[in-house]
Image (spheres, rainbow, N blue to C red):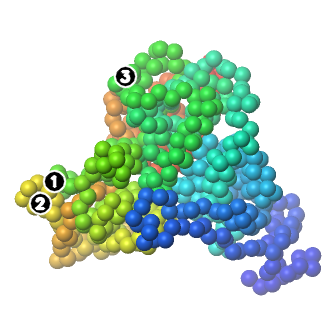
Amino acid sequence: MPATSVAGHNTDALIVLSGDCGGIVVMPKLNLNRVEMPRQDPIARGKNFNEVALGYTPEMAAEEAERCIQCPKRPCVEGCPVSVNIPEFIKALREGDMPEAVRMLKSKNSLPGICGRVCPQESQCEEVCTLAKRDAPIAIGRLERYVADWEQENKQAVESPTSDQPEPTGKKVAIIGSGPAGLTAAADLVKLGHSVTIFEALHVAGGVLMYGIPEFRLPKAIVQGEVQYVTTLGAELVLDAVIGKIDTVDELLANGYDAVFLGTGAGLPMFMNLPGENLCGIYSANEFLTRTNLMKAYLYPEYDTPLGMGNRVAVIGGGNVAMDSARCALRLGAKAVYIIYRRSEVEMPARREEVENAMEEGIIFKFLTNPTGFLGDGRGWVSAMECIEMELGEPDDSGRRRPIPKPGSEFVIKVDTVVVALGTTPNPLIASTTEGLETTRWGTVVADEETGKTVKDRVWAGGDIVTGAATVISAMGAGRKAAADIDKFLRSN
């Protein structure tokens, strides 16, 4: 772009905003030097479950916050599924007012310590940051994590969430599931004055945040700190409560609850139905990660959760769950870990950061490769995986080139553990025990995209139970929308 002049300034050194901003605004010279976050050394971290990303120091956070130009149009807020007040919390951080930074952040996001770690900011708020045009968006997620972690370490300096309690409405809402959608809906509804009870099927709250995401990406203490925040607001938490068994949705509605929100996620694993897939040593990613994360198999025998782990592990899939599974396998002692993905590297749905971390740690990627069957050792255990190379053909309905088998390219990989990470669908228990609830052929619940309202009276749903497996932040966004509509309904009835 050629240099021009605005009010005597060279625009190569400035950012010039005009049009909708109500005139011309000349901002200071851009700082395009995005502050990188320190991480554990790849060799060291491949042998432990400690958090990989180490977080900003106060000096790093201040330096990165100074880069924010506080642009009037606030595209970052529009790019956030829960509409976090991003410029405001960054401005408070920059000015050293950390309690205000916490207040601005948590006014829209009840789980910032989680979002700052696992939310795909690079494809949401950071993607539309004004500085992204210069390939240097503000590290919004890293700053969010910094503020959230500061709050956990300085709770006495932050105003109690119960200091400004709303007037009780007398209405009761049941939240089914304590994952990101359920926790978000619960927090918002309590803040609006409603009585909220969260029913969680497992013995620990947090849903997929606890059983699905490894400690090295999302420490369990962070999740439980966020859960505690929601209960401190006033939400009641009931554990070991499988709705559909102890009570049905209809029974909850008949026994005093004015509305129900379904946030049970998508925990039913999908398999490939290949020959030999029932051999021992072949896991769904759901079971593998639940045993590893929630049941702490990595601390065996301190925690009595053995998890058979061979020397050569194959993980089938290309999403974040596949990356998590492969990196867990490495930390559990596998000597060689393969990612088997039938498309090309550029089409992998996993976050680029997680792919890079896996590659740095020594995970072996086999792209354009598809399993065709599994071979046993004669004693019921998997010993090898039959594969075929793929090539890209004509585009399919999604516009992507369809992977097709390459004739004569069959080969065998010796493996003694396989993890199938090809996605999940909702558990059918809720749908099968709730009369009048409409579902799709994939088992997901039909709900309005903007409100979360299902076709069943007084029942809302959001997150993976509606969309299928998706991101934490999209589930939180659905929880917020549903909470707003539930509040509107309760106040009009």
The answer to which quarter of the image holds residue 479 is top right
Given contact means CB atoms under 8 Å apart, are the residues at marks 1 and 3 in contact?
Answer: no
The mark that comes first in sequence, 1 or 2, is 1
Q: CA distance from mark 1 to mark 3?
A: 34 Å
Residue at the limit of the structure toward the top, as seen here: 255
Identify whether 62 is placed above or below 263: below
Helix, strand or loop status at disc 1: loop
The image shows residue 477 at horizontal and vertical percentages of 57, 44
Q: CA distance from mark 2 to mark 3?
A: 41 Å
Residue at the limit of the structure toward the right, as seen here: 7
Q: Quadrant of the C terminus?
A: top right
Left or right of 223, for residue 284 = left
Q: Can residue 99 be seen?
A: yes
Pick the front one: 113 or 394:
113
Q: Indicate the amino acid at tag 2.
A: Gly
The image shows residue 431 at horizontal and vertical percentages of 36, 31
* Residue at x 54%, y 26% (from the top left corner): 236
Q: Which residue is mark 2?
A: 376
The answer to which quarter of the image holds residue 441 is top left
Left or right of 294, for residue 304 = left
Identify whether 411 is placed above or below 144: below
The mark that comes first in sequence, 1 or 3, is 3
- How many discs mark residues in the rendered view? 3
Q: Residues within 10 Å of mark 1 (few under 14, many from 20)?
A: some
- Disc number at residue 268? none
Q: Indicate the amino acid at tag 1.
A: Leu
Q: Which residue is mark 1?
A: 279
Q: Which residue is mark 3?
A: 246
Q: Residues within 10 Å of mark 3 (few under 14, many from 20)?
A: few
Left or right of 442, for residue 454 = right
